[in-house]
Each structure stands twice: as C-alpha cells, then as structure tokens.
Amino acid sequence: MTSARFLCAAALAGMLLAAPASAGEGHDHGEAAATPQAHGPQRLPDGSVFLPKPAQRQLGVRTLQAETAELPRTVELNARVTMDPNAGGKVQPLNAGRIEPGPRGLPRLGQAVRKGDVLAYVVPSAAPIERANQAAQLAELRAAQAVADKRLARLRELSDTVPRKDLEAAESEALGLAGRIAAVGGGLATREALVAPVSGAIASANAVAGQVVDARELLFEIVDPSRLQIEAQAFDAGMAADIGSAALAIGGQRVPLRFIGAARSLRDQALPLAFQAQGAALASLAVGQPVRVYVQTRTQSQAVAVPVTSLQKNPSNQTIVWVKTAPERFEPRPVTTAPLDGVNTAVTAGLQAGDRVVTQGATMINQVR
C-alpha cells in the first residue's frame, strides 16, 4: 500500500514539472524586448545619438561648420592678478600708535576714495618716561622763553644806548625758543594722518577704531578695478622673445592683454612675465586671484578652432566633440586639442573641414542614453 502511494506521488510530480508554467492575465513576462521610443532622444548601438528636431530646439543645440586655418601655437600659463603700481597703493603708518577714525569715519571694503582723502589718524604711542621727559623739556623751554622775553623788553627800552647787535641777538633767541616750544608741544599732541595715495576703491581694510598698530603695518590697499596687472610664470626663459599676443578668459569673454616685459631673475624656478589688462570685464577680478593666461607665439600650425564648450568626455575619458552627420543624428568624434585663447580651442586631429560641430547643447547630447 505504501509503495503504491509513493508511485502515484512520483507520477504526479513528473506531470507538474513537464507542464509549461504560465502567469496570470496581465502578468505575462515574455522574452520580447521593450519597443524603444521611436520619436524621443536615444543612444543608438553604434554610439551616435538620435535627436529629433523638437528636442534640438528645446535643448538649444547650435552647430558651427569647421574650417581649417593657420592658428598660432599657444602656451597656457599660470598667473595671478596684481595691482598696477601706477593705479594702486598701500597705506601704512610711519609710527606705532592707536587708530582714530578720519573725518568721514573708517573706510569700508569697496568704498571709492580719491587721492588725498584722510582715511584715518594714528595717535603715536610713547612710554610714560618719554612723555615725562618731553613735558620736562617743554617746561624748561617755556621758562627760558620767559627770561628771554624780559631781557628783550629791557633792551628795547634802552635801544638808544644798547648796540643794535645785542638787540637783534635777543630777538633771535626769543624766536628760537618759541619755535622749539611749538615743536616739542606739537610732538606731544600731534597725530599722523593716513592719506589715500591714489584714487580708486578700497581692496582691503585692516583697521578698526582704537586698534593699536605697529609702524609699517599694512592697513589699507587701494586699487583701480579697471587697471590691473597680470603676472604669469613661464618655465621657458626664451618665451619672452616669441610672444605674439596674449589673452585672458573671463566668463566666456576674451580679454586681450598687453605684454609689458619679463623679469631678469627667476622666481620659484620660473620667469615672471608682466601683462597689462584694461577693460570693464576686469571688475570681476580681485588682487591675488589665480588666473590662466594664454600666450600665442609666432609659430603657426594647421588646426580647427572650436569653442571650449564643444569639448566633452566619453565613457573612456577621451576628449570628444559631437558632429552633426544628419538632420537628427549626432556622432561623437575623438579629437586631439591644444589651447588657443581660453574661449576657443584648437583641434589638431579628429575633425575635417566642413564638419558641423555642436557648439551649444553638447553637454545635453552627451547625457543621452
């Protein structure tokens, strides 16, 4: 009986394993792949991107026809912003003392000042023994002046019988004592006025009322935001003789620079190069800010100029640009680039004349999956 039940159970299990499994209505998981969106942006198997016209307008895609030209060889240098020595200045006290506000109070950051404005006062500090010695010297001078004035008055009463030279000597002695009293008395009560050496804006302010400062301590810096100087570092000492032009990229805008000259001594194993920068775009820069200078040499080579915004990275970390090969098809092209002017870059390999390179919206195309 037991063996018969065992045989029936085994037969039933075999029938269940052999029968095909099926899910309920609405839960069937077939092997057919999902149908891709026929009218939406999508990445094609060959790596290109299908982007319909409405999506291109929505993403603001713009293209530019590549043209081969003779472009200068450009070197990218590290630089920093410095003040123009003819349009900036520093305010430092000559003596140690205590800070007092000027006629219009202490200047604030960014405040415009004019040459000759009094920014603050420094009341000189002196040891008690020094001030006591000056007070004693002042008292002695005043006593001597009183004696000299009385002697001068007597001589003037006897001017008919006293020689003229004695009278003039007494007058000179009285005047000398009066000058010495004024000098010593002024030294006790005087204060040093800190005056703006140039017109411009306050770049840094390190003074508050009542602060005790030392001599030569930097309290204020004044710069003209429209006139700044750029100091770049070149590790090739012969570059100074091969500079054609230079530029600085600020917010997607190219700002030309004028080469002033090169130093004759190395600094940090590099040769400092000075450039003059002018223009309204420099208002966004600050003294000491690190920037990059693009120096174009007189050597030229064949390349294609494209905007820096066209450069992207593929999953293999290669530099690519997107080329429009059909009205709704974009293809990635690995390229080799070189710096040009900060706003544009030179493509030395990977593009041909006539290719439609994406200049705007390349980031969005690169994200299509």
Image (cartoon, grey):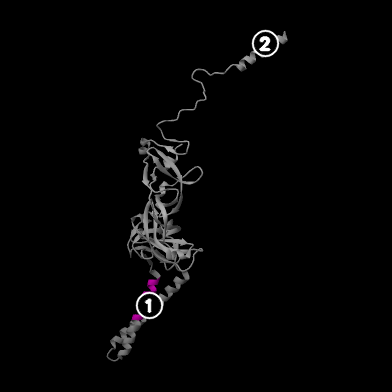
- Prevailing secondary structure of the magenta residues: helix
Along the line of sight, the residue nearer the viewer: 292 or 66: 66
Along the line of sight, the residue nearer the viewer: 44 or 110: 44
- What's under tag 1, amino acid-wise? Arg
Q: Is residue 289 visible?
A: no
Measuring from the top left, give residue 50's x and y in whole percent. 42, 36
Measuring from the top left, give residue 114's x and y in whole percent. 32, 62
- Magenta stretch, residue numbers: 175-187
Cα gap from disc 2 to disc 1, whole angstroms: 134 Å
- What's under tag 2, amino acid-wise? Cys
Q: Which residue is mark 1?
A: 180
Residue 85 quadrant:
bottom left
Residue 184 belongs to magenta span: yes
Q: Which corner quadrant holds the N terminus?
A: top right
- Residue 261: numbered disc: none
Q: Is residue 55 visible?
A: yes
Residue 361 quadrant:
top left
Residue 103 lies left or right of residue 273; in this view the side is left
Query: The residue tagged with tag 1: helix, strand or loop?
Result: helix
Label 2 crowd bin: few (<14), some (14–19), many (20+), radius 10 Å = few
Query: The residue tagged with tag 2: helix, strand or loop?
Result: helix
Along the line of sight, the residue nearer the viewer: 295 or 166: 295
Q: Which residue is mark 2?
A: 8
Mark 2 or mark 1, which has the lower sequence index?
Answer: 2
Along the line of sight, the residue nearer the viewer: 157 or 258: 258
Residue at the extreme top: 1
Measuring from the top left, give residue 40's x and y in whole percent. 41, 33
Q: Quick check: 123 above or below 350?
A: below
